[in-house]
Image (tube, rainbow, N blue to C red):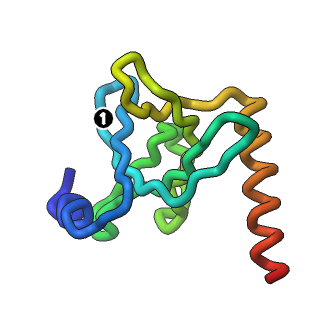
Amino acid sequence: MSDKEKEILEEDEDVIVEMTDEAGNSYYYREEMIISVGNDNFALLIGIHDEEEEHTHSCGCDCGCDEHDEDVLIAKIVTGEDGEEEYVEPTDEEFDAVQRAYDEIMDEEEED
């Protein structure tokens, strides 16, 4: 984690989530909002990056995304065996349902 990322984490009161890829690389995300779908909760996570450093997207796609594109994830919030919240990848169906719920929330905000 860069010094800038550490500074952000220390100053910020938001929920910060650490995600680790298959290679053991850590990525840090700010929990932007919680979206409820049925009985499940999903987190909209925004990547925390030092803007001066080059970063790769956690998707590992090497897609050449514009460096100004936000690194956004949707994660399902589940309770682990230890009773702590865990963030896991949603199924395709869950992802689609969360996307529809998010779109509805944004449409309602535009109407206000």
Query: What residue appears at the point 48 percent right and 37 percent down from the top-left corner?
Result: 60
Query: What residue appears at the point 30 percent right and 39 percent down from the top-left corner?
Result: 26
Outermost residue on the left side: it is 3
Where is mark 1, residue-wise?
25
Q: Quadrant of residue 13?
A: bottom left
Query: In the picture provided, is 102 more to the left or to the right than 66?
Result: right
Outermost residue on the bottom side: it is 112
101, 23: nearer the viewer? 101
The amino acid type, in three-letter code, at marker 1 is Asn
For the C terminus, the image quarter is bottom right
- In the displayed structure, 28 sits above or below 68; it is above
Residue 3, position as x, y percentages in the image: 15, 61
Query: What residue appears at the point 50 percent right and 52 percent down from the top-left corner?
Result: 45
42, 19: nearer the viewer? 42
Residue 111, position as x, y percentages in the image: 84, 80
Q: Quadrant of residue 51?
A: bottom left
Residue 70, position as x, y percentages in the image: 52, 61
Query: What residue appears at the point 68 percent right and 27 percent down from the top-left corner?
Result: 91
Residue 108, position as x, y percentages in the image: 81, 71
Outermost residue on the top side: it is 81
Q: Quadrant of residue 9?
A: bottom left
Query: In the picture provided, is 46 more to the left or to the right than 10?
Result: right
- In the displayed structure, 68 sits above or below 89; it is below
Tag 1's secondary structure? Answer: loop
